[in-house]
Each structure stands twice: as C-alpha cells, then as structure tokens.
Image (spheres, coloured by chain):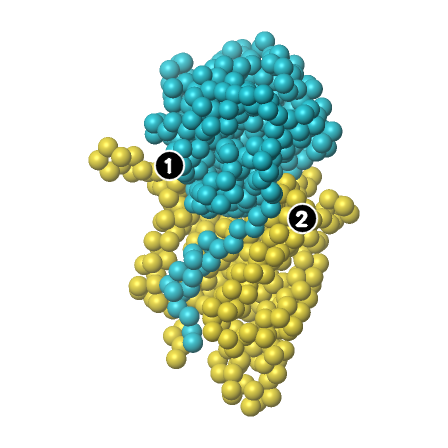
Amino acid sequence: MKLRPTAALGILALSATLAAPSVPVSAAGDTILFGSPVSLTGSLTKEGHLTQEGYELWKNYVNAHGGLKVGGKTYKVDIKYYDDESKNDTSAQLAERLIDQDHVNFLLGPYGSGTSFTVAQIAERKKIPMVEGNGAAEKIFNQGFKYTFGVLSPAKRYLEGILQMAKAQKPAAQTVAITAASDAFSQEVAQGAAAWANANGMKVVYNNKYPDTATDVSSIISALKQTNPDIILNAGHLQDALLVQKGLKEQNVIAKGYGYSVGPDTPDFASSLGKDANDVFGGAQWSDAVKYKGAPGFIRSAPEYAKAIDAAYHHRADYHNAESTAACLAFQYAIERAGSLDPEKVRDALAKLDVTTFYGIIKFDSRGINLYKPMVVNQIQNGRLTTVWPAFTADGKPIYPAPPWGKR
Amino acid sequence: MHLVLQDLANGILAGGILAVVALGFSLVWGIMNIINLAHGAFVMLGAYLTYQLFASLHVDPFLSLPVSFVVMFAAGYLLQRYLINWVVRAPILTTFLLTFGLSLLFVNIALIVWTGDQRGVTTAYAGANFTIVGVTIPWVKLYTLLVALVITGVMHLWLTRSKTGRAIRATSMDIGAAQLSGVRVASIYAIVYGLGAGLAGVAGSLISMSYAINPNMGEPFLIKAFVVCVLGGLGSVQGALVGGLVYGIVEAFATQLDFTIGTQHISGSGLQDAIALAVLLIVLIVRPTGIMGKATA
C-alpha cells in the first residue's frame, strides 16, 4: 500500500497528540497537594524546568521549616507535576486530571501564556484556585475568570522599561523597530511597546511578526534593516531571541540598542552567543538586584533568594525561578490568612492579598493580574547580567549606544 | 529592488538547508515507503554531535560534518537492520508508530544527556558577512548552501552511476524483480535508512550554526521536510533540492507581503507557514506527484 501524502499528514497530526509521562506523588491527610502541568519537554522545556525549580525551592523551604499553619494545624506541602509537552490542550487535559483523579487542593500555573490560558478555563470550571507566575498575556485576565491569579506584571509592560531607559539617554532614542512571535503573549508585548513608543514621542518604523515555529527570520531582518532604527526590540521567547540576535549580526544590522522580552535573562543566551550577547537589554520581571524586603515566612531578600537557587541548582537565579516561587508565596500567605483549605475561602483571600516578598509586591486587581510591580531592565555587560533600570534598583549604568558588532 | 534581491538570497540560503533536511526523509519515504517520524530527532542528534565536538574539542563545525554523517549512518543502518526491518512489510501505521516511538526515545535521551538548555555553536567567524550589489550574505550560510549543493550532487551521481545506487533504485521500482536479479533487499533497506539518518545528521550539523540547539529542535524541521519532499516529488534527489529552494524562497517573499482586507491589516510574515502550505496545495492539485516527481504505477 502506497500512502498518500494527504493521509499521512492526518496521521502525523494525530500522532503528535499522544503520550504524557507522569511523576507519581501520594496525597496524605496532613499534606496540602498542589498540582501543575508544566513544560518538561517541548519548545518551552528550558523555561518549564526553571518554573519547576521555583516551585520545588519553595516546597523544600516550607517543609524544612515545619510546613504551613492553617487554622491551628500544620501541613506539609507537596506538588504533583505532569509534562504538558509545551502544548496548550495537553496542559488543560492534565489540569483536569490533577483535579479529578489526583484531587489536588490547588493549581500552580504551567509555563507560558498559551498554556496558562487553557488551564485557567479548567480552574474556572472546577472552581479550584490557580496562581500562575508564567502567563503574562492580559487575554487570560480579560475573560472575567474568578479563580486565576497572576503574580506577573502584564505582557504589555515587558519592553516599556527598555524604551523608557533609551529615551532617557543622551541623545535620546527616536525610532524603534519591533519584531514579534505570533503567540498571544508576544503579540501583547509588541502592542504594549508600540503603544508606549507612540504615546511618548518615539516613532515605530517597523513592526512585524513571524510564526512561533520559524526556523529562519532573515527576511524580517532584511526588511527591518532598511528602516535604520535606533532601537530594535524583539517580543518572543528564548529560541527565537537567539535566532534574531544571530540574524542581526549576520546581516550587519547596527542599532544603538537591542532589547528582548525573553532571552538575555536566561544564562543560555550568553552561553550560546558568547561575545555577541554583550550589551543586549532584556525586560525582566525580577532580578537579584531588586531591593524589596519581604514579609516573614520565606526568604526575604533577592540576594538571599539568588543564593538559595545557586545552592540548590548551581546556576544564577533567573526571573522565571523567582516568579514561579512568587506564585507559591501567594498561596502560602493567602492560605494562612484564610485559615482554611476551602477553595472558596482561599480564592477570596487571594483576591484581597497585599504582601511584599523578595520578588516585589503581590497584589491583584479585580481581574486577577498584578498591576502593582514594576519591571526591571537588565543588560548583559561583559558576559554578566547587570540591572540597569529603573535607576533606584540598578546595580550598573546602561552601555548605550551599543558598540558595533565585533567590538563587544 | 535591493530588498527583492536580498529576499531571494535569504530564500535560497534557507532553502539549501531545507533541501538537505528533506533529502534523507525523501529517500526513506520514496524507496522504503516509511514515513520516518524519527527524522527530526536525527537532525537534532547531528546538531548535538557538532555542538559536543565544538564545545569539548574545539572542532570546527564544518569539519564535524563527516563525523555526523558516519555516526548517524551507522546508527540508522543498525536501527533498520535489527529493529525496523521486523516491521518493514507491516501496514504503514506500524512503521509510523515505531518511528514516532523512536523519536520520543531519542528526544528524551537528549533531554537527559544535554538537559533542556538552549545551546549554540558560535564560532569566531559566526556572523561574518559580505555585501554584493547591496545584498548582505553571511559566509556561514553561503558555505552551508555550497555543502548542500555538493551533497545533493554527489547523492545524485551515486544513485544513478554506482552499483549500490542502481540497486537502491531498482528496489524502489520493483522489489520482486530486484530480488530476482540478486539484490539483497534487507541490506539495501539498511543502507537507505542509514543514508537517511546520515543526511539528517549532516543537516543537523549545518543547522547548529544558525539555529538554537535543544532536544526538540527537530520538530519544525520534520514538518518542513515533509512539505518539501511532497512539494518537490518523492524519493528524488532533484525533487528535494527544488522543493527546498522553492519552500525557502516562498517563505522569504511571504515575509514582505502586507495587505489590508477591510479594516483588518494582515502581515504576510505571520502567515509564512500558511502561505507555504497554500503553495503545496496548489502544486498537489496541478501536479500531484510534486514539481520534479514522475508518475508511478
């Protein structure tokens, strides 16, 4: 039998939806069980593992310090994970399984806006509160969901800081070109940056998107190069950030500043690109230079948190770690304040939460998103990530304009 | 005008890589009638081989090409001989599931060995480029294209001139007649599958220089290989080359499309995939055997 291409394509699509391995965990009477479908394989593997590290660090800390006190009783915490393979639908199915079969008390978010959006719908239907630290698209929060809370600053803010910083330089940046992946998060990031630029007297000279599965972006870079922008921004994820940065050098595109929504903050960016990673800006939810004093009950400052991550996982703390831990902290303080494990009471306590942590303020607006915490801007300076904006929290000055390729 | 030439160059440079990715996939499919879902994983393994040689022994990525080919050829040969050969006559779904399972296995092994971190092969000459009539060409991608052309040329000559090559083509045309003429089909199949894996490995090594390396990097290339070889025509060397170049050029030009329907502004670059698949659909309607394909009985 010869197989026709069209039939084969159908089978190809079908086979892609198979298989999801799991890690077994037992739920005891004195344990609060959290569940999370998270990207342990698939295109967001790296970010998924950083998320899991953030969750695990919190779990281990809490258990090592006696557990959580809820209405006079002390509970250990445990987290059950499933691998969602970075797929939105799989993530939702696994969330359903966590609630129906594993009987988790609460959900911790998956990695990414796409997955967080589908899981939020399950949380809503099952009335199980979810706090997520890795889905910043406002689309998630504009559905009127009552059970989903996000500790992140919203997506539209990701690149604002870089533009603010560039505008404060002398001479101020005047033109900006934006490239963005086609997923919901990246599109909101790009729209937010374009809106800020337009409202603040900067000109958007190029604004275009590419599919998030792109394997080549050279034609976008060719078109962007013709507009000769002061600032080049990319709204995407680590994999495409690497593709764009390599492409900019290959076509010798020279700008005063290069900024990414996701990429420079992950150590892989500098280790993959070497010197070509230098002087690049990244918008970040958090850095180990931020100067917040956290409430008692957990590690209280950013440098101490960074030390704990380094001791446990032997790498520099990444903002994905911090925001994931922050999601757990939101539950910790809300559960303690609710004095109960009842999903409704914990939900109400989350809605009223207003607490400062090592990560910053955790407080949700009526839609469930954290509008109260500013973003920071990091720059890779001589291979090292340095926080350069906002000035009150910076540990270095921005290098601007960037030296030409080959001199970094 | 410059942008048109630049896009043409971008498309050809990207298409050359796609041609090598698709070539091995196309041979295995055309000759053995196996849609090898592990092909993307082989690409990934080739990229990691190059990365590992570069990171630990400072071997230039271009010098690692023969290593990738030999290692992956051997792996593919053994896999076919001792595993896939058991089901090579089974209904297509069986080989489909087997190669899909192999793909999952390899991706997860890579995840254990190299973790999910993104890796890169960044040489001292990475990003070096020259400009000719206003068109900027990166050297690495130009060399990659040349390697791709040499590989397809050599493969074409080998398949048409050498004894083994002719036996391979005979097997694909009529197994029974080939066996009667003394061709050992099991060994031919193992060679073809080995070639498929070896070419995927070389493609992975070439890709490692311009694309982020991670355990799942093969997936988009598997899908593109599928489209390219249907577009160009199954099982033929020229088909993979033409298909790859057409796909690359279509994607490059799709990027610059911008149009407005009513109040809705549509950007062609977000629709690259859709436009490339639309071209595939048109080709399938007009020429169901692909651009270079010949009708078979």
Q: Which shade of the palette goes to chain A?
A: cyan
Q: Is residue A351 visible?
A: yes
Q: Amino acid at mark 1?
A: Arg
Q: Between residues A13 and A127, which one lies in front from this camera angle?
A: A127
Cα separation, mark 1 vs mark 2, equals 36 Å
Would residue A396 be found to the left or right of residue B251 on screen?
right
Q: Position of residue B166 (x, y in %)?
A: 56, 79
**Percent from the top left, x then y, of residue B252?**
43, 45
Crowdedness near tag 1: few (<14), some (14–19) or many (≥20) residues, C-alpha within 10 Å: few
Residue at the spot of label 2: B112
Amino acid type at mark 2: Ile
Q: Callout 2 environment at 10 Å: few (<14), some (14 to 19), or many (20+)?
A: few
Q: Do tags 1 and 2 sit on the same chain?
A: no
Q: Along the horizontal axis of the image, is A263 left or right of A314?
A: left
Residue depicted at x 29% and y 34%: B265
Residues B278 and B149: in front is: B278
Q: Residue furthest top?
A: A392
Q: Left or right: A117 with respect to B40?
A: left
Which residue is farthest left?
B262
Query: How many marks on residues?
Result: 2
Image quarter in which the N terminus of chain A is found: bottom left
Q: Which chain is yellow?
A: B
- Callout 2: SS: helix
Q: Nearer the viewer, residue A357 or B109?
A: A357
Kindly identify which residue carries mark 1.
A125
